[in-house]
Image: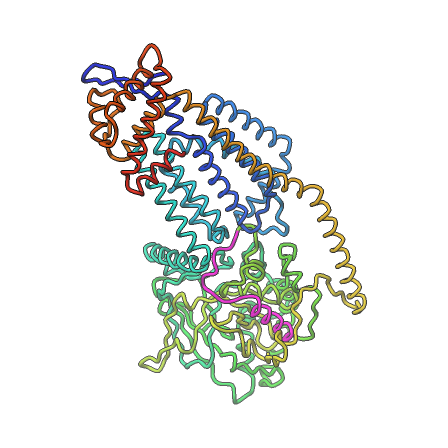
C-alpha cells in the first residue's frame, strides 16, 4: 500500500515512496521496544525483590518475564490483531489461575496488604504465584501505553524512585538504573509513534542514557552519601510543609513507633518555668504506652487499674479519691519523710505558646498545684536526687496515711506487673529469641543486658531511613538497620524489660537539659521547648519512686553510661559485653532445668538444624537447581535466537524492498544531517539539490539511481536487476559520504536510531 498525502490548497495528490510496512519497520523496530519493555519489567522485579520481607523464586519469574516481554513486544509492532488475541489468551490464563489457585493467591495478596499497612509477618511467604500472574497483565498493558503516552514515562517512573527509601529499595541501584533506562527508551518510542521529531528524541535518549550511566558509576559506590542528600532534600520539604500548614506548632506525641526520618522544625512549642535551677535533666511525661501491637503503643489506662483496686479493697482513699491519691503518692511520702536533707519541693509551670495544647505534661515525683494558670498549669515536684522516701520515718499523725499508701502501692504493683509485662511474642520472633534462655539475678543485670545490646547492635541517628513494610519497626531497628532515634531505643528497651518480667512502659514527652534554662529577672528560670526537646524513653516501676524514667537513648557520639535510674550502678567493663553473653539462645531455659540438659537440647537442636539443612539442599538439588540452571541457559539462548530472527527478518525485508529501502535510508541520513529537509524524492529539482549536497558524487550516477527508485515505486514494471543493484550501491555510497560530514554526536545518534 502506498501512502498518499493530500494537499487541500492545491487539490493534487503527492505520493510518498515509502510503504506502510516499511515505515513501521523503520520507525517502530520491535527489538528496541522489546529491550525497553524488558528493562522496565526487570527493573520492577529487582525493585520489588529488594524490599525486605518480599520473596519470590527468581529463576521462573525472570524467565517468564522475558518470554512475555518478547511475545507482546513483537506482536504489538508486527500485527495488532495477533497482539489482541494474545492479550485475550493471557487474560484467560490469569483468570484460570485466579480460579484454581484462589486460596494461595488470596494468602499472598493478604500478606502484601498487611505489608503495606505495616503489619509484621513472622515468616514472610513466597509471592511467586502472584508475581507470575501479574507478569502477563503488565507485559500486555505496557506496549500500548508506551506507544500512546511514552513522553510521560520519566514522570511515571519518578514516584518509584522517590518511594525507594520508604520501601527499603533505595540501595537497589541496578533496579533504579533499569527503570530509568526504560523510561528514557519509552520517551523515544513515544516520540517515534506520535510522529514527533525523531532526531531530538534520539538525541535526548542517548544523552540521558550516558548521563544515567555516568551517574550510576558515581552513585553505586556511595549509596550512603546519596541517602544523606535525599534526607536533606526530604527534610527541607517536610519543614516547608509543616510551617505552611501550621503543623510545626503541634506537639510531637503519640504511641506510633516512627517508620520515617525525624526532621526538626526548630519552632518553640512550650514555655517551662521553674523556681530552682535543676541539677539533672527534667522529663515531662505526655503519652504513656500500654500494650504494643503492629508497631504502635496503645495508651496506658491506669484509671481501670485504680478502679479495680477501689472495687476490690473498698478502702477509704480520702477526699481526693484513689486516682489523685495515687498520682501524688510518692511526692507526698517524700514530702512527709522526716529528713533534713530533703529540700522543699520546687515549683514548675507549663504554658503553651500558640494555643491550648493537645497533651498534658507531668513531671515525675510531682503533684498538681494549679490548673489553667496563664494558658497552662503548675506543679510542685522533686528531682530524682531529692527523692529519699523512708516509709518508717514519718510523723505519727501521718502513719495511717502511710499505711494506706503502702497498701495502694502493693495493690497497684500487683496489677501493673500483669498488665505492663505483656508482649506480643508471636509478632516479635527475633526479639523473643534474643531474650529467651537468659536469666538474671537483679534488675541491674537486666539493665546491663539491654544497655549493652542497644550499644552494640545500634547507632543513633535522626535519619535512619524509612522502615520497610511488612516488618516490625523495633525488630528492624535491632536486627536489620541498626540505626534509629529515641522512639526506637525506648520501644526496644520497654519490650525487653517486659520479656524479663519487669513492668515497663513506653513514654513520649519532653526532656529538658539544665543548660536549656535561662535565669529571669525575678529569680525564676525559663526554658523554651522546641521539637528538638521532644523525646521518648522507657519507665520502670521502683518501690520507692513509682514510675521512674530510664533513658536508653545514647548521645549522637557515644554510648549510654552513668546512673540510668536510682540505685543502678554501672559494672566494671572487664569484658567487651560487660560480662554478659549476648549470643542468642534459641532454646528457652526452663526453671529447674540443669545445665547438662540445656547443652543436650542445644546439641540436639544443632543436629536437627543440620539435618533440615541437608533436606533443604536435597530439595534444592531436585527442584530449584534444575530450574535455575535451565533458566540460565534458556534465557540467553532465547534472546540470541530472537535477535538472530529479527536480523534475518530485517535483511529479508531489505532484499524484498530493494533500492527503495536504501533510498529511504538515504532520505533519513539527509534529514539527520540537516540537508534537504522535507524532500521525498519526487521533486523535479531533487537530483540537482542532491548533487549540490554531495559534490564528491557523480551527478549522472545519482540521476540514474533516483530514476531506478522512481521506476520501482511508480512504474508498471520493476527496474532491471542491474539498475536495482546500481541504485543500491549508489545510495549506500551517498549515505557513507553524508555520515562522514556529520559531527560525531550526530553520527552516533543516527547510528543508534537506525539500529533500533
In-front residue for pair 526/184:
184
Q: Position of residue 447 (x, y in %)?
A: 61, 72
Where on the picture, by quarter, is residue 228? bottom left
| Colour scheme shown | rainbow
Residue that appears at 61% across and 48% down: 124
**Residue 591 included in the magenta stretch of the image:** no
In-front residue for pair 183/501:
183
Where on the picture, by quarter, is residue 290? bottom right
Q: Is residue 244 left or right of residue 473?
A: left
In-front residue for pair 41/230:
41
- Report the quarter where the C terminus lies: top left
In-front residue for pair 389/446:
446
Where 346 falls versus 669 (above or below)? below
**Residue 451 included in the magenta stretch of the image:** yes
Q: Position of residue 490 (x, y in %)?
A: 54, 66
Q: Is residue 1 left or right of residue 687?
A: right
Residue that appears at 23% across and 23% down: 687
Amino acid at each position: 500500500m502506498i501512502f498518499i498525502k493530500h494537499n487541500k490548497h492545491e487539490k493534487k495528490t503527492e505520493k510518498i515512496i515509502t510503504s506502510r510496512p516499511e515505515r513501521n519497520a523503520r520507525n517502530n523496530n520491535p527489538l528496541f521496544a522489546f529491550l525497553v519493555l524488558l528493562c522496565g519489567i526487570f527493573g520492577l522485579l529487582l525493585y520489588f525483590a529488594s524490599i525486605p520481607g518480599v520473596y519470590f523464586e527468581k529463576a521462573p519469574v525472570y524467565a517468564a518475564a522475558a518470554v512475555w516481554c518478547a511475545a507482546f513486544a513483537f506482536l504489538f509492532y508486527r500485527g495488532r490483531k495477533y497482539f489482541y488475541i494474545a492479550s485475550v489468551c493471557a487474560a484467560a490464563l490469569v483468570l484460570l489461575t485466579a480460579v484454581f489457585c484462589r486460596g494461595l493467591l488470596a494468602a499472598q495478596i493478604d500478606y502484601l496488604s498487611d505489608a503495606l499497612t505495616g503489619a509484621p509477618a513472622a515468616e514472610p511467604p513466597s509471592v511467586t504465584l502472584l508475581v507470575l500472574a501479574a507478569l502477563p497483565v503488565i507485559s500486555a498493558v505496557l506496549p500500548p501505553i508506551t506507544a500512546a503516552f511514552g513522553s510521560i514515562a520519566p514522570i511515571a517512573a519518578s514516584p518509584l524512585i522517590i518511594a525507594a527509601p520508604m520501601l527499603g529499595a533505595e540501595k537497589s541501584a541496578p533496579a533504579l538504573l533499569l527503570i530509568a533506562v526504560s523510561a528514557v527508551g519509552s520517551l523515544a518510542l513515544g516520540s517515534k509513534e506520535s510522529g514527533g521529531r525523531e532526531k531530538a528524541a534520539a538525541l535526548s535518549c542517548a544523552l540521558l542514557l550516558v548521563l544515567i550511566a555516568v551517574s550510576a558509576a558515581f552513585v553505586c559506590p556511595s549509596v550512603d552519601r546519596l541517602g544523606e542528600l535525599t534526607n536533606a532534600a526530604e527534610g527541607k520539604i517536610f519543614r516547608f510543609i509543616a510551617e505552611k500548614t501550621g503543623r510545626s506548632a503541634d506537639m510531637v506525641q503519640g504511641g506510633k513507633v516512627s517508620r520515617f526520618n525525624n526532621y526538626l522544625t526548630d519552632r518553640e512549642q512550650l514555655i517551662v518555668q521553674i523556681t530552682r535551677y535543676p541539677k539533672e535533666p527534667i522529663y515531662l511525661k505526655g503519652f504513656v504506652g500500654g500494650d504494643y501491637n503492629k508497631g504502635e503503643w496503645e495508651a496506658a489506662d491506669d484509671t481501670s487499674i485504680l478502679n479495680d483496686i477501689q472495687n476490690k479493697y473498698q478502702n477509704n482513699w480520702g477526699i481526693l479519691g484513689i486516682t489523685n491519691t495515687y498520682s501524688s503518692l510518692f511526692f507526698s511520702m517524700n514530702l512527709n519523710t522526716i529528713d533534713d536533707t530533703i529540700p522543699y519541693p520546687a515549683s514548675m509551670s507549663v504554658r503553651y505558646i500558640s494555643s491550648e495544647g493537645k497533651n498534658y505534661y507531668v513531671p515525675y515525683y510531682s503533684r498538681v498545684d494549679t490548673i489553667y494558670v496563664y494558658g497552662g498549669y503548675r506543679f510542685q515536684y522533686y528531682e530524682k536526687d531529692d527523692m529519699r522516701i523512708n516509709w518508717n520515718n514519718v510523723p505519727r499523725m501521718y502513719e495511717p496515711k502511710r499505711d494506706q499508701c503502702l497498701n495502694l502501692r502493693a495493690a497497684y504493683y500487683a496489677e501493673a506487673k500483669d498488665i505492663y509485662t505483656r508482649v506480643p511474642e508471636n509478632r516479635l520472633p527475633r526479639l523473643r529469641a534474643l531474650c529467651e534462655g537468659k536469666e538474671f539475678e537483679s534488675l541491674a543485670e537486666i539493665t546491663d543486658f539491654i544497655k549493652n545490646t542497644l550499644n552494640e547492635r545500634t547507632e543513633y541517628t535522626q535519619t535512619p531511613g524509612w522502615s520497610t513494610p511488612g516488618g516490625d519497626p523495633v525488630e528492624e531497628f535491632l536486627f536489620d538497620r541498626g540505626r534509629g532515634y529515641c522512639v526506637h531505643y525506648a520501644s526496644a528497651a520497654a519490650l525487653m524489660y517486659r520479656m524479663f518480667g519487669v513492668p515497663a512502659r513506653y513514654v513520649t514527652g519532653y526532656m529538658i537539659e539544665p543548660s536549656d534554662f535561662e535565669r529571669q529577672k525575678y529569680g525564676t528560670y525559663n526554658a523554651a521547648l522546641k521539637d528538638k526537646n521532644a523525646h521518648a524513653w522507657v519507665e520502670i516501676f521502683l518501690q520507692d519512686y513509682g514510675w521512674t524514667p530510664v533513658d536508653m537513648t545514647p548521645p549522637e557520639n557515644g554510648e549510654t553510661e552513668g546512673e540510668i535510674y536510682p540505685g543502678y550502678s554501672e559494672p566494671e567493663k572487664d569484658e567487651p559485653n560487660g560480662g554478659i553473653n549476648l549470643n542468642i539462645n534459641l532454646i528457652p531455659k526452663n526453671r529447674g532445668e540443669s545445665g547438662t540438659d540445656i547443652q543436650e537440647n542445644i546439641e540436639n537442636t544443632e543436629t536437627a538444624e543440620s539435618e533440615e539443612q541437608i533436606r533443604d539442599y536435597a530439595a534444592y538439588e531436585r527442584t530449584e537447581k534444575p530450574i535455575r540452571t535451565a533458566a540460565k541457559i534458556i534465557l540467553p539462548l532465547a534472546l540470541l535466537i530472537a535477535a538472530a530472527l529479527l536480523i534475518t527478518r530485517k535483511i529479508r525485508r531489505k532484499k524484498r524492498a530493494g533500492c527503495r529501502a536504501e533510498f529511504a535510508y538515504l532520505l533519513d541520513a539527509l534529514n539527520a544531517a540537516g540537508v534537504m529537509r522535507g524532500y521525498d524524492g519526487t521533486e523535479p529539482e531533487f537530483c540537482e539539490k542532491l548533487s549540490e549536497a554531495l559534490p564528491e558524487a557523480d551527478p549522472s550516477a545519482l540521476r540514474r539511481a533516483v530514476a531506478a527508485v522512481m521506476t520501482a515505486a511508480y512504474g508498471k514494471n520493476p527496474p532491471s536487476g542491474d539498475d536495482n543493484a546500481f541504485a543500491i550501491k549508489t545510495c549506500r555510497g551517498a549515505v557513507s559520504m553524508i555520515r562522514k560530514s556529520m559531527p560525531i554526536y550526530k553520527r552516533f545518534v543516527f547510528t543508534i536510531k537506525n539500529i533500533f
